[in-house]
Amino acid sequence: MLTFWPHPSRLLTPDAPVPQILTPEAKSAIFHEMGVDLVLQIPFTQEFSMIEAAEFLPYLMKFLPGLASVSIGENFCFGRGRTGDIARLIEEAGKYDIEVFSSGRIKENGEEISSTRIRENLQSGHIGRANRLLGYPYFSYGPPVSGRGAGRDLGFPTINFPWAPELRPAYGVYAVELLPDEVGGHHPGVANYGVRPTVVADGDPVLEVHLFSFDGIKPGATCRVAWHRFLRPERKFTHVEDLIRQIALDKEEARGMLQVVEVSDRRAV
């Protein structure tokens, strides 16, 4: 699998880059779990962006001298100024006896699936729709860190993740499952992603996960948090007691939602 990093917009439109849904590490993990043997990540640099369309395949063949075929999506463009399209790739590939396979866009309810649609749904809190478009539950990935114990003081101990994605999902409360690499299994819970306005005056967004019946996560262990359902937006409560009551309601609502989540929607990526 061939990918580029950073996204070309970082170089070509640095004032308005396209926020990425996944980190390179998360993307590679998905590819490998799909059965891909090798992920080749090419740095998208100024030099790379200047490669002419006719030189694109020879450039790839430096890394993959045994290249026999190329599979692309129908809207794939390549080469300086995006001058290369499918027809041009077939023409150039013929010079090296390389086969070209192209696939059409996949649709959902008659509408093409695109990263733009996925971004819009994540940012508006429609996590269920985003998951359907992705084909797997949206997830965050990384090691937990020790927090200040604010959740424990409220009666709902949490596992904290200092997670900073380029594309920030809607701040709010979600029904989630924790998938720790070392321990394994699916561990349901409720999570808050946001700036915690009731208990923190000012701060960066944090993902806090409260599990229903599991506390065996070791500090530093790599974990995946699968996001399944959006419960409500994050908001500031006037009294801490109101927050505690709301968390208890969120917990029960998340428990009920996760009980009806289909197996296909729960699978780890």
Image (spheres, helix red, strand yellow):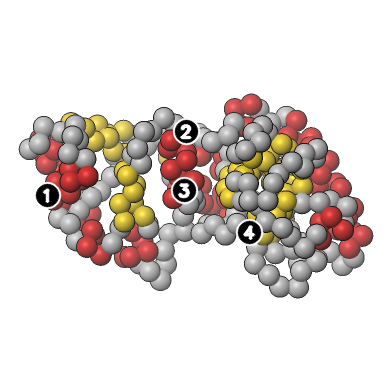
At 67% from the left and 59% from the top, the residue drawn is: 206
At 65% from the left and 27% from the top, the residue drawn is: 262
Task: Give the spatial CA distance, label 4 vs label 3.
Answer: 16 Å
At 46% from the left and 48% from the top, the residue drawn is: 25
What numbered label is drawn on residue 162? 4
Task: Give the spatial CA distance, label 4 vs label 1.
Answer: 44 Å
Please state if 257 lies on the left or on the right of 119 as rendered: right
Q: Residue furthest top?
A: 263
Looking at the rendered structure, the kind of residue marked 4 is Pro
Looking at the rendered structure, the kind of residue marked 1 is Ala
Residue ID for mark 1: 54
Check whether the beta carbons of the residues at disc 4 and disc 2 lie within 8 A of each other. no
Lower sequence index among marks 4 and 1: 1
**Local secondary structure at mark 4:** loop
Residue ID for mark 3: 25
Lower sequence index among marks 4 and 2: 2
**Local secondary structure at mark 2:** helix
Lower sequence index among marks 1 and 2: 2
Tell me the crowding category of disc 2: few under 14, some 14 to 19, or many 20 or more residues within 10 angstroms, Cα based: few
Question: What is the x, y in percent for residue 87?
Answer: 16, 40
Can you say which quadrant of the picture contains the C terminus?
A: top right
Foreground disc of the pair 1, 3: 3
Task: Give the spatial CA distance, label 3 vs label 2.
Answer: 12 Å
Q: Residue furthest right?
A: 241
**Local secondary structure at mark 1:** helix
Residue 240 quadrant: bottom right
| Residue 41 in view in this figure | yes
Residue ID for mark 2: 33
